[in-house]
Image (cartoon, rainbow, N blue to C red):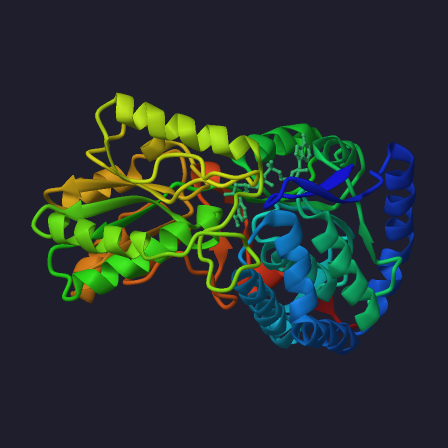
Amino acid sequence: MNVINPATGTVITEITEDTNLTLKSKYNLLKANQPKWAAVDIKSRVSIILKFVQLLKDNVDELANILTSEMGKPLQQSKNEVNGAAGKAEWLANHAEEYLRSETMQEGATKELIKYEPLGVVANISAWNYPYNVGVNIFIPALLAGNAVLYKPSEYAMLTGLAIEKYLLLAGIPTEVFQVALGGGKVGEMLLDFDFDLIGFTGSYKTGKLIYEKVAPKMIPCIMELGGKDPVYVADDIADIQAAAIGIADGAFYNNGQSCCSVERIYVHETIYDEFCKHFLAEVQSWKIGLPTEEGVYISVLSRKEQVDFLQNQVDDAVAKGATLLHGGHKLPGSGYGFEPTVLVNVDHQMSLMMDESFGPIIGILKVTSDQEAIELMNDTKYGLTAGVYAASQDRAESILTKLNTGSVYWNCCDRVSAALPWSGRKNSGFGSTLSHSGLRAFARVKGYHLRGV
Ligand code: NAD
């Protein structure tokens, strides 16, 4: 399989895909050795993961270069991602003992305990948009809890996957406990024939649904981290409209809009709408566009060629249905897979732009007349990952946030993930949770101990 640099369209290297046979031997190796890893005391597991964290921090430049070369992320954003992944892994390692230790629920004639036991062998089928960041959400807590992991990076992030493996092994994770499966969707699908104890999937709703349906008869539990169509609402009491516009523009366009929690829809109260759009546009027009390796570039290429046509179709559909193009709207010139940062107004929910995940540098801004209208529009989606409100009053913001059917909500911020808080989707954005105490415990099974001495 060719690894292609999306900024130039050139082949970086060739990778040999896994076959059913190689997958089988990797799975069997993990299955046979997982109990030994589970028997390693948690302090040692934590210290290995903390060594991995240090290796990530010590090798930011190398890891960022690999990421930029195969998925086109601007180099500074790649460095931010490596540092972010290291920070999340560190939080998980530092809290593993606290949240995975057994708990005494009742003393007395019958002592009652809860123990958090490893699941066994976990498959981690992953996405390309934040390969370090979304990978650590799954393989780090899985390893900390005593599981073995078969990690399948996306076919668009295989070099990143191999770099992760290199540093995990260097940190002291035994090779029999962490294996990498290389290849595309077919290799992912082959994995579903094995008896994993959990599938941690990060990717699109379409693939997530397919995986869930396929493994359901085997009763294999899944964690599904899927797509989003995340809205933000700007209320009329906001004090600094310009600051809100700049923050939301970053939330929509950072990583070229290729984030599961990118802002994908903006609703603005009619009284501040014109001013908001003016500042938003000025911010978008100020960005440097170019190759991902150029200093100061904010918007670069998309990772996948097909995405250019998908975005063009969304823009064309919106314009045909009455939207006004304020900025951009076309492929960027050159051989890379670039698309202009694009802003549309006069949009509505009949347009694919406002209903289907764009996963690119395009956004629609819609004028609303009340908080109630904003709530209804924000909830009018198949997805439920995140939603944000920009407002001066916390009470007003919270009264809106409680009515939004998403796994995360934001007040005066957006496009944000924290290791200390659960990361979970609702509806077509998935289910189960990573990060926080619930994300650590997600990779263990609880067992109730009823202990009565004679
Ligand atoms: P994708 O669904 O195309 O691929 C994800 C993974 O699934 C890849 O490794 C791929 O090879 C594998 N795969 C493809 N077909 C398969 C099959 N039939 N059986 C088993 N595996 C298969 O998604 P993507 O393009 O890599 O990622 C983008 C999507 O991921 C977006 O929708 C984005 O919102 C979502 N995402 C969600 C989160 C989150 O935390 N909720 C984080 C990052 C990305």
Residue drawn at 70 percent across, 47 percent down = 153
Residue 209 in the image, given as x and y percentages of width and height: 57, 31
**Side of 417 where 132 appears, left or right:** right
| Residue farthest toward the front in the current orientation of the protein | 334
Q: Is residue 49 above or below residue 248?
A: below
- State which quadrant residue 346 falls in: top left
Q: Percent from the top left, x then y, of residue 311?
A: 43, 32
Query: Residue furthest toward the left?
Result: 271
Q: Quadrant of ligand 1?
A: top right
427 or 366: nearer the eye? 366
Near-viewer residue (6 or 357) = 6
Is residue 111 at least partly visible in the picture? Answer: no
For residue 244, say whether it is visible.
yes
Decide which of 187, 74 is in the foreground and name it: 74
Going by the picture, which residue comes out furthest to the top?
320
- Quadrant location, the C terminus: bottom right
Residue 329, compared with residue 276, is above or below; it is: above
Q: Residue at x 70, y 66 (%)?
A: 62
Placement of 118 over or under 206, stated as above or below: below
- x and y percentages locating residue 405 in the rendered image: 34, 45
Q: Nearer the viewer, residue 80 or 139?
A: 80
Residue 168 coordinates in the image, percent (x, y): 78, 65
Which quadrant holds residue 110?
A: bottom right
Q: Give the side of residue 6 with respect to residue 426, left or right.
A: right
**Viewport quadrant of the N terminus:** top right
Query: How many marks are shown on the rendered structure?
Result: 0
